[in-house]
Image (cartoon, rainbow, N blue to C red):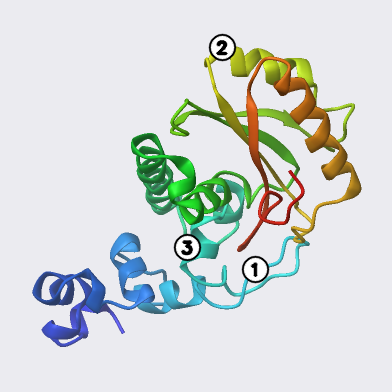
């Protein structure tokens, strides 16, 4: 049903203005961003389908991204494959994702990172979880453990030979960092660290220790998941 055919108090925009954003369902909020549906499918139906069972990465069509979190972790290529999401709609969704990243970054710049570990994990998931290839990133922190910068330093299959400790040390000195949080993603979907992950962590910890930079954690992410090696006693 087109939005204009709904009762006034059931239309997402009017409902939001009258009762606040919290009164809207995920599908209604998404419908406000999308604004219009496609031929034969209203915007609320399109929004609902985007939030349904996750799409697959192997070419087998799914019906959606598995909720708001899944949609916000979607890449530009993921969105491009959805019928009905033209350039304008894709741009709006990607803009919302970037706003979420920047809002979290601001929180981490204003307070000690580990006063809010959940935000740290969500921040890293927003950056890395949806990537189809492995990416190694570093969060550089000041003496009060506030975020100075986050940089993606290496891509591909991550091993001790493909992540260069010297480059990590150089970037830490560039930012005058007192500590770092290491992070990478597992496209396979599991966040359990491998032995190679553990060995890499210890190698970087030793290299950074030579310039008095502490490794506070190594976080591994996948869509909807995160693992803290510090919390598991592996750092």
Q: CA distance from mark 2 to mark 3?
A: 45 Å
Q: CA distance from mark 1 to mark 3?
A: 15 Å
The residue depicted at 27 percent of the width and 76 percent of the height is 24
- For the C terminus, give its image quadrant: top right
On screen, residue 76 above or below 175: below
Q: Nearer the viewer, mark 1 or mark 3?
A: 1
Q: CA distance from mark 2 to mark 1?
A: 41 Å
Q: Nearer the viewer, mark 2 or mark 1?
A: 2
State the SS at label 1: loop
Can you tell which mark lies on residue 55? 1
Q: Earlier in the sequence, mark 2 or mark 1?
A: 1
State the SS at label 2: helix
Camera-side residue: 185 or 79? 185
User: Quick check: can you spot residue 40?
Assistant: no
The residue depicted at 81 percent of the width and 35 percent of the height is 202
On screen, residue 35 above or below 100: below
State the SS at label 3: loop
- For the N terminus, give its image quadrant: bottom left
Q: Residue furthest bottom?
A: 7
Position of 191 with respect to 23 (left or right) is: right
Tally the marks: 3
Q: Nearer the viewer, mark 2 or mark 3?
A: 2
Can you tell which mark lies on residue 110? none
Q: Where residue 132 sits: x, y (%)?
A: 72, 48
Position of 38 with respect to 13 (left or right) is: right
Q: Earlier in the sequence, mark 1 or mark 3?
A: 1
Q: Are marks 2 and 1 in contact (CB under 8 Å)?
A: no
Can you tell which mark lies on residue 84? 3
Residue with the mark numbered 2: 174
């Amino acid at each position: 049903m087109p939005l204009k055919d709904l009762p006034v108090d059931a239309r997402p925009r009017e409902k939001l203005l009258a009762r606040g954003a919290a009164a809207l369902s995920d599908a209604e909020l998404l419908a406000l961003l999308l604004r219009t549906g496609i031929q034969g499918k209203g915007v609320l139906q399109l929004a609902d389908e985007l939030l349904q069972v996750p799409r697959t990465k192997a070419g087998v069509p799914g019906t959606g991204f598995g909720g708001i979190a899944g949609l916000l972790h979607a890449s530009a290529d993921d969105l491009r494959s959805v019928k009905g999401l033209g350039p304008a709609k894709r741009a709006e969704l990607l803009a919302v994702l970037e706003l979420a990243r920047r809002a979290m970054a601001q929180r981490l710049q204003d307070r000690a990172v580990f006063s809010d570990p959940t935000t740290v994990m969500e921040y890293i998931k927003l950056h890395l979880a949806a990537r189809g290839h492995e990416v190694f990133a570093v969060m550089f922190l000041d003496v009060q453990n506030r975020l100075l910068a986050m940089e993606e330093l290496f891509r591909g299959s991550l091993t001790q030979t493909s992540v260069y400790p010297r480059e990590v040390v150089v970037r830490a000195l560039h930012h005058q960092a007192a500590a770092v949080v290491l992070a990478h993603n597992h496209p396979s979907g599991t966040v359990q660290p491998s032995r190679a992950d553990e060995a890499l962590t210890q190698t970087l910890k030793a290299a950074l220790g030579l310039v008095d930079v502490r490794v506070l954690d190594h976080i591994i992410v996948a869509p909807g998941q995160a693992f803290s090696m510090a919390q598991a006693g592996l750092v």
